[in-house]
Amino acid sequence: MWAVLKKEIKSYFLSPIGYVFIGLFLIMSSVFFYLDVIAYGSTQFETMFYSASTILTFIVPVLTMRMFAEERKSGTEQLLYTSPKSITQIVLGKFFAAVAVIVITELLTFMYFIILCFLGKPHLQTALVTLFGFLLLSMAYISFGMFASSITENQIIAGVVSIGFFIVTWFLPSFGSAISTFSLIDMFDKFPSGLIAVEEIVRFVSFTVLFVLFTIIVLQRRKSVK
């Protein structure tokens, strides 16, 4: 898994993908930082993440849409199946490489917290809880985006499917409390309040594990028919 992880991280930063993702996120975060925090004379770093969480809907597919779709289209998918690495190791390596890009991005957003330290006294614990929740949300998005990439050879289709799914989850709470349990944005909402909600953590982790497993199953079945 580590070899795959290193290879994927290099691929993100030896190509424009990693830089585009981080750049887009920081540009939009800067806008929300001004609109949601500075414009109100606030020092609550976490409030910008209510808006920033919506950015993930549109830019996480930048990281995930090429994961397996590109392999199928270019014909290098066969190399995955003949690799000494197991399908599980390959999937986890790709997954954690994308998570690593998210972690780097989150560390860079801490510059906003530092700015607020010069303007007042932002609450560090709440900021850290918010970033933890944001990481969980990102991991859930990555797991589904990876699954979408595994079922098609077209990167654009994988990206559109991911974005469409994420947008649909925004509106699930309006259809009833039972369905709202599957709303990823709704799960994240408690974290910027500084609350470590065990139920939400379990739901995030369950969602993430489920779609990582779905991806492994899809690839295992495709390997078995090759």
Image: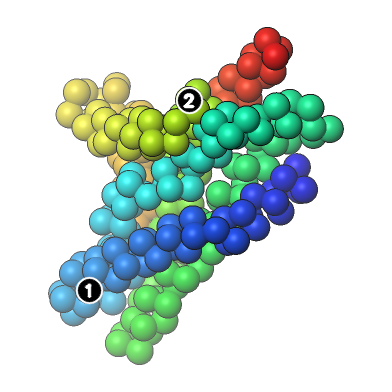
Q: Earlier in the sequence, mark 1 or mark 2?
A: 1
Residue placed under numbered mark 1 in the picture = 34
Location of residue 222 in the rendering, given as x and y in whole percent from the top left corner: 63, 16
Q: Mark 2 belongs to which amino acid?
A: Thr
Residue lying at the far top of the rendered structure: 225
| Quadrant of the image occupied by residue 75 | top right
Residue lying at the far right of the rendered structure: 84
Nearer the camera: disc 1 or disc 2: 2
- Residue at image position (37%, 50%) is 59
In this rendered view, identify the residue nearer to me: 131 or 22. 22
Residue placed under numbered mark 2 in the picture = 152
- Residue at image position (35%, 89%) is 118
Location of residue 127 in the rendering, given as x and y in whole percent from the top left corner: 41, 66
In this rendered view, identify the residue nearer to me: 34 or 147. 147
Residue lying at the far bottom of the rendered structure: 118
Location of residue 44 in the rendering, given as x and y in whole percent from the top left corner: 29, 71
